[in-house]
Amino acid sequence: MSINKGFLGFVLHSHLPYVHHPEKEKCLEENWFFDALAETYIPLVGLLTKLFEENVPYRLTVSLSPTMTTMLMDDLLQERFVLYLEDKVALGEKEINRNRKNPDHLKLSKLYKEHYEKCLDDYEHAYKRNLIKVFKTLEKAGCIEIITTAATHAFMPLYQELPHVVEAQIHTAVISYGRVFGQAPRGMWIPELGYFPGLGKFMKQHGIDYSFIAAHGQLFACKKSKYGVYAPVETSSGMLAFSRDIPSSRAVWSRKDGYPGDQVYRDSAQDIGYEQPFEYIGPHIYDEKIRINTGYKYYRIDTGEKGHLYRPEKAREKAIAHAENFIYQRTKQVKKLSSIMDRPPMIICPYDSEIFGKWWYEGIIWLEHVIRKAAVADELQMISPAQYIDEFKENEKVEPIFSSWGNKGYASVWLSGANDWIYRHIHKASERMEELVNRFPDESGLKKRVLDQAAREVLLAQASDWPFIMKTCLNADYAKMRVKRHLHNFNKIYDNLCRNTVNTEWLTRIEKENKIFPDLDYRIFGNNKVSELK
Amino acid sequence: MTEERLQLLPEDFLREIAVKEGISFNETIDKQDLIDLIIEAIEDDRAEKVMINNPAMQIKERKFDITLNEQFDFEEDQYPLPEHYNETKIVMLLRDPAWAYTYWDIKDSEISALKFGALSGELFLRVYEMISKEMTKSNIQDYTDIPVQIEDNSWYINLPETGIFYCTELILKSETSEKVLCRSNTIKSPKWEVGDMDDFQEHKGTGNDLLLVAAVYDLSASEVSGKIPQRIISMIDSEFLE
């Protein structure tokens, strides 16, 4: 690490809610995970491994949520993912045949089929279905630093009046990380960057050294840091908070102002899943009747006239040019900042991992070339926040304000007319969970199993994804069902415990369905530590 | 939802979808017209949702966007939740510096007393503005009463000022007396602005320097000078209002 350069802190946040339905032969929502694996995570670990093998020096921070790691390690989902890939390859065969007299389309059919074949081959043989192991290897090699996030990605500000919930979300995440990675996490991604004053105390208590916040979380605070958002601030608990850089975020996040909106890039909306007749596409869509994205897409971003063929070579050239531009802009930014800072600026670039590949098809190429160019840049260096804080131990003390990266910067995405009804019930279940810990402080055997499952159901109901989907997505029914189902399961357990009865068969069934956090201890919802924090 | 998918659904099911979507229609409407109404409503809904999302939320939305065709196969009553929890309690949640959400519950016995006249009066939410977290007389700066009905159980409250504390009581008020049924937790509304720029000014001095460390230097704000908190606010806000 050279302290004469500016620093780029790339953070790739990798999260999906826990979706696991052994009770069904197949489940449409499991495709959230499968699409992300095929379009983002397998290409991403392939890229990071290739760069490591070529001795390209780089350091990224990868936030892997506990729900994501659980799904990556789940046998059933692994099995179903292989079937998913096999189906994509089979569709590729059909596409090659369908487009045999159309060379331009044929080339793309072959490209996609080869992509899915490579995914399948890598997943089965190179990675042996174990992407966690690849991430661990990359971390051991010093290429990435893996951090965690709250257990089920709860939007913390809406639970600040229930400190035992905040504590349970963080503690469970740290335990889960330890079980998966064999060590303690130094960093933690705050779900949706949803900070509230005092949250750092809960995190620091569990050994979390640093996290990330929205820029205005720091800029609107009472006290200002002289480095603005280009150095972390020390929160009242001692945990360090790095702020998101706005210009570098916009360059990638924004379809309007950012690189992904360029018309040479592939249009992810135009997909043969919606274009081909049922007789042809039926076996490759959901239940043979619900049209879905298939991954076979032949057009570039619509310019107003549909039907412009996607040209991968041109898109590749543009992605490389955009990577150059990104490095150029960040270098310019560093030069300007260096003139007024007495230490190197740290530019924090947090992205949702699924931007690269799934949302922006060429994003993986862009990322590769950003890393390659940063590796040889004179004035920039990619480092992790942990490297930064090991070098710069003194930081200004500022307690960030309530903030998030949602629309308008606060909680309006997760608390609106579309989803506010859930909090009455989730808060009540959370209170009752604490009550159960007080009533049954030292259970074992079957009763502990029941209580552990109650804790699991409460945690799963708290995921920020459910209110998000209710507010912003068209398919809200699944999210509503999930919240209701977890609460229903919890209430049933609560009522059974009040009557001192247990339905073992039912318990075993829901344990199989929601088998996240195998070592969860229900007493995590106890209030011992919370009272100290209060 | 595509027209093709709707065409495959039975007419009774289409009517259920239309009701669920809040579409008004005549009982004699034919299938195609109903489908057109549903498509129009869903497209409007989609356009509105896309418009309100900032870039970060648009990408998050895409994570879950795997089909245009809603399933509509979840029974609303499959996992019933209690309508209320038989306790008298009020909770306040901060949504943003200008709005809070409050939900409450009233014990069955008190509801009955209200309905059948053992208790009389009207229900109000009294929203206190306070200068510190503790609810004491000396801390109360002002308060506002919001009339609510016995059937209500939640309310969005406009917060008139940022940087202060708020607490809400659910009050039963008659001509001669007031009874506090319950009191909420206290929330603090954060400032909705950069605030006192002196801390920055002390370190830097020029407007351009302020913009640099505030990460908004290249958002069409190259030439600025002096104290410019309003411009910084609008530029940061544009990140969220896009």
Image (cartoon, coloured by chain):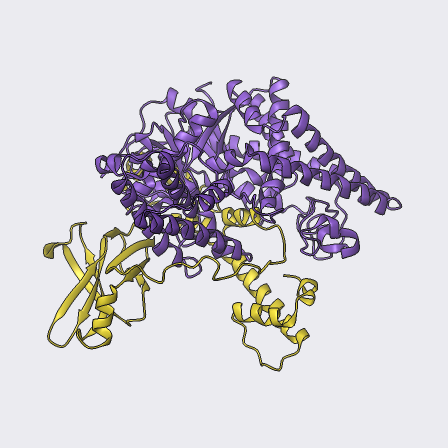
Chain colours: A purple, B yellow
Q: Residue at x 26, y 52 (%)?
A: B187
From this view, report whether residue A12 is shown above or below residue A343: below
Q: Position of residue A394 (x, y in %)?
A: 31, 24
The residue most toward the right is A101
Give A29 or A313, whichever is nearer the viewer.
A29
Q: Position of residue A337 (x, y in %)?
A: 43, 32
Q: Residue at x 16, y 64 (%)?
A: B180
Q: Residue at x 76, y 51 (%)?
A: A281
Give A377 or A140, whichever is nearer the viewer.
A140
The image quarter containing residue A165 is top left
A302 with respect to A238 (left or right): right
Q: Position of residue A104 (x, y in %)?
A: 83, 43
From this view, report whether residue A321 is shown above or below residue B33: above
Give A344 or A400, whichever is nearer the viewer.
A400
* Residue B242 visible somewhere in the drawing: no
Give A438 or A89, whichever is nearer the viewer.
A438
From this view, report whether residue A476 is shown above or below residue A314: below
* Residue A147 visible somewhere in the drawing: yes
B91 with respect to A262 (left or right): left
The image quarter containing residue B9 is bottom right
Q: Position of residue A135 (x, y in %)?
A: 54, 26
Q: Quadrant of the C terminus of chain A?
A: top left
B135 with respect to A518 (left or right): left
Please tell me how many numbered marks the rendered image carries: 0
